[in-house]
Amino acid sequence: RKGMVRVQFGGAKLLDKACFIVGKLNILKGLPYSRVQAQLPAAVSQTHFESAVSSLKPTPRGPDSVPLYFKRATVAALPECATRNNSPALPHKVTDLVRTHAPGSEDTTVVVACEDESQVFASGCAITRAYSLYNRKSRDPAEPRVENQVMVDFVLPQGQEVSATAYERLNVVAESIQLAARLVDMPANLLNTDAMVEEAEQVADALPGVTIKVVRGEVLREKGFGGLYGVGKAAAAPPALVVLSHDPPSATKTVAFVGKGIMYDTGGLSIKGSEHMVGMKRDMGGAAAVLGAFQAAVKLNYNQRLHCVLCLAENAVSPDATRPDDVHTLYSGKTVEINNTDAEGRLVLADGVAHAAKDLNADVIVDLATLTGAQTMATGKLHGAVLTPSADIEAKAVAAGKASGDLVFPLLYCPELHLDEYKSEIADMKNTSKDRLNAPSSCAGLFIYEHLPAGYKGDWLHLDMAFPVHNGERATGYGVAFLQELLSKGL
């Protein structure tokens, strides 16, 4: 944890420290020097600051930056506009600029000039994503542990002030984004299924009133969780279904977050090639995201019933591993012929959503998963892919993506044209489609949907986040802010 960075929004200002100022050029030009003078190094005068801002020349697609005082102070202008499928806050540009100009190597103030308060949440989450907590680099035992602080302040036009509630929300969500990112960054030899259960227990213990239930190993088989058990039975650490529950007395609705938690994915007996296996520690990114989002929601006093369902397993190879041609009975009661053991995420999620609907009586089910490699071909590396029968929920999801910076874009929802892909001669369905060129990410989501009970009256939303879960070799904590924004808008 050498050089760990803690992000704080609002509160006491860091005086005469490293400083990074970022925003749209028109907002920066209207920013009074007096508003940022205390945060800037003393050597930066008003004339110097105003001259630097005037020299900025961002393009429609690219930002521009100017040093104010060597590398200790910089001002940067974001690109001039965001197109309709992006967030107006341009969060990915904010993250990139913060990583470059405010890397957290010393105490730093980051000042963000926003066009209005609606951009504060996405901008703050973007800054959080620039700082990772997990670090296993060796250090001299005599060297003290370093924890640098990044203080974030927002400036709005015409002297408007960001509300204390907005700062409080950001501090809570930032903590949960960093929790999710830390878990995704951890290697599977240190974070196996058992260790992830312990992480969930620690989250539950720290949240007043939250209960936790763990179903593990052979008990899963006995209770009928054939998908989760079948995927995880070959691993040294047994599979587990973990449910954290928040049940306020005034609740009138039940929401369930369901997360895919494949702690490592070798592909099973349908084993991945070496070039495709590196990075599969991230295949639990959906579970990490829903755990972080659950923590944030409870800390922010979410007033509806909320369950966090973690479907945890390692897709390993051993004599006990599931074989292609095996048939498993899932918790929904449906039988599934396995034709590819590397399509395991949908099996564990099918059990998770069935449990949420049948046993938790969820009115709304949202599942998150690093589900398909095809997601990047459907929606790109930065947009998650959402699938739902509801046009209203789809629109809310897209809006939540823009407001949080966890961007999403809809997948094709047309089960009458796609479910035949799963036809099996000996079981209710196969686990992968026969034509992998036929909307594979949509088909993967539909597999999960098919395991909801017949006649389920609630809402269901699926988010495939295979690529947004990381940026290069670092996790992003993707999904936490998205879920928090959905809840805040009354999902």
Image (spheres, rainbow, N blue to C red):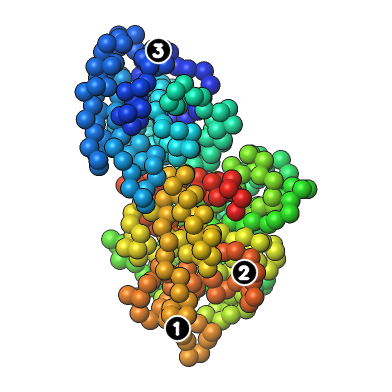
Residue on which disc 2 sits: 354
- Category of crowding for the residue at label 2, using alpha-carbon neighbours closer than 10 angstroms: few (below 14), some (14–19), many (at least 20): many
Residue 321 is situated, as x and y percent measured from the top left of the image, at 48, 72
Which residue appears at 39% of the width and 28% of the height? 113
Circles 1 and 2: CB atoms closer than 8 Å: no
Q: Which mark is residue 34?
A: 3
Which residue appears at 27% of the width and 22% of the height? 53
Q: Amino acid at mark 2?
A: Ala
Circles 3 and 2: CB atoms closer than 8 Å: no
Q: How many marks?
A: 3
Residue 7 is situated, as x and y percent measured from the top left of the image, at 47, 30
Which mark is nearer the camera, 1 or 2?
A: 1
- Category of crowding for the residue at label 3, using alpha-carbon neighbours closer than 10 angstroms: few (below 14), some (14–19), many (at least 20): few
Which mark is nearer the camera, 3 or 2?
A: 3
- Category of crowding for the residue at label 1, using alpha-carbon neighbours closer than 10 angstroms: few (below 14), some (14–19), many (at least 20): few
Residue 358 is situated, as x and y percent measured from the top left of the image, at 68, 69
In this view, the residue in front, 414 or 453, is: 414
Question: Which of the marked residues, 1 or 3, is nearer the chain's N terminus?
Answer: 3
Q: CA distance from mark 3 to mark 2?
A: 57 Å
Q: Amino acid at mark 3?
A: Ser
Residue 438 is situated, as x and y percent measured from the top left of the image, at 35, 76
Which mark is nearer the camera, 1 or 3?
A: 3
Question: Which of the marked residues, 3 or 2, is nearer the chain's N terminus?
Answer: 3
Q: Which mark is residue 308?
A: none
Residue on which disc 1 sits: 420
Q: CA distance from mark 1 to mark 2?
A: 21 Å
In this view, the residue in front, 429 or 193, is: 429
